[in-house]
Image (cartoon, rainbow, N blue to C red):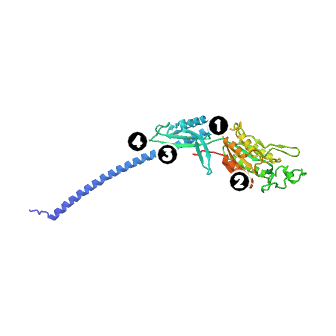
Amino acid sequence: MIRKRPSCTAGRRLRAQRDTHAVALFSHQSRRGAAHVLIAAMVMVFLVTAALTVDVAYMQLVRSELRSATDAAAKAGAEALVRTQSEDAAISAAVNYAKQNTVGGRPLDIRRTDVVLGRVSGGSTGTYTFIPNATPANAVRVDARLGAGQATGAVPLFFGSALGFADFSTSQNSTAARQEVEVCLCLDRSGSMLFDMSGVDYSYPTPNPNLSSFSSWGTIWQYHLSPPHPTQSRWAVLEDAVSLFLREASAYPIHPRTTLVTWGSDYTMPISPNTFYPASTSDVPLPSSSGFSWSTNKTQIENAVANRTANPMMGGTNMSAGIDRGVSELTGANSLRLSNKVLILLTDGQWNAGRDPLDAARDAAARGITIHTVSMLSTDTATLQQIATIGGGNFYRTSNQAQLRDAFSELARSLPVVLTE
């Protein structure tokens, strides 16, 4: 039997089928190899991402711990500065308290040179500025650093060495000012404080329920020899503002030890009992910091102001006598060397007795005392503005009860100082 040879067309078809199968087999093997490479690359990316995620999260945790430890150290230093009045004790407290906090599982060690003392001052925008090495110190800044050559070394990472970095360095600073505040309310009690709020001299609020029975010298003298009107006199309006100041100051955790100085000029009442009114008086001396009670201090001032309300007011405007008396209180035996000292000077007139109040203001500023001035219907605002400028304080112009309340409220709110950065 004779077999037929396949035709050329059939042979070509068989070869084409064999070639197609071979190509398909090769393509499948190539795709499987490429998938393996892709999967390996994806696994590597996943592992790197996971490692980075763990280390980045740990780095953030360390930064948070460092922030908390630095804040705590700065606060401890500021507290010690107030309590001991010693710069060396403040630095030691900051260093020791830092060590009581752990950062990255280790105690935070800082050097004494990482603790900087200085002064914090408030700006008009409500921000605070730290001035390093300024004296007298009222604030403590702690500069904490983790890294090579520092008291606390760099922080080791979990997977960083596999990626080319075994540890990381960081830093944090914190400033705290927890200071004693000493305030002198330096209030004008001259005869014009009996006037009403019209701004007119010798215009007394009527009828005055406390009017003197002495009328032989006429109506003006009758009112002038009487206690101020309990609600409508300038003194009564001031009493209301002082009460607001004390309430505002009560809202803060650090209460200002406060002295009350009232002033006028040396004057003797021209009728019996011929009472003598000295140019200035410490109605409430500055309390000692030892065993200080704000409640007691506040009550003493309220009672002293009320006592003035119940008695006649005499004399001219010896402004420098008031400033000088305030300075003596804020620099006396009960004053602390590193305290923030503030004198609030209020008057309704212009100085007409004693030495130039600008000289008194310069003397106060030289002793580190800030002076704020409040004009209450005063015609001599220029002098008060100059006094505030010399004393590094603010000047407030008021002509009614609402404005006076606003001024004393703002003054009370400006007293506290807190953690600043």
SS at circle 4:
helix
Earlier-in-chain disc, 3 versus 2: 3
Q: Quadrant of the C terminus?
A: top right
- In the picture, measured across the screen, residue 358 lies left or right of residue 81, that is right
First reached walking from the N terminus: tag 1 or tag 2: 1
Q: Residues within 10 Å of mark 1 (few under 14, many from 20)?
A: some
Q: Nearer the viewer, mark 1 or mark 2?
A: 2
Q: Are marks 3 and 4 in contact (CB under 8 Å)?
A: no
Give residue 181's position: percent from left, percent from top. 67, 42
**Residue beneath label 1, please?**
83
Residue type, label 2: Arg
- Furthest residue in direction right, as rendered: 216
Of helix, strand and loop, which one carries label 3?
A: helix
User: In the displayed structure, would residue 17 be above or below residue 297?
Assistant: below
Between residue 125 and residue 63, name the one nearer to us.
125
Q: CA distance from mark 3 to mark 4?
A: 18 Å
Residue sitting at x 14%, y 64%: 8
Give the x, y percent position of residue 419: 60, 44
Q: Report the residue marked by disc 2.
A: 397
Q: Secondary structure at mark 1?
A: helix
Q: Residues within 10 Å of mark 4 (few under 14, many from 20)?
A: few
Identify the residue shown where x is 51% and y is 44%. Answer: 63
**At label 4, which amino acid type do we have?**
Ser
Q: Amino acid at mark 3?
A: Gln
Quadrant of the image containing the N terminus: bottom left
Would residue 410 be visible to someone looking at this image?
A: no
Residue labelled with disc 4: 161
**Mark 4 → mark 1, Cα distance in angstroms:** 47 Å
C-alpha distance separating marks 3 and 2: 51 Å
Q: Relative to the observer, which residue lies in front, 374 or 20? A: 374
Report the residue marked by disc 3: 60
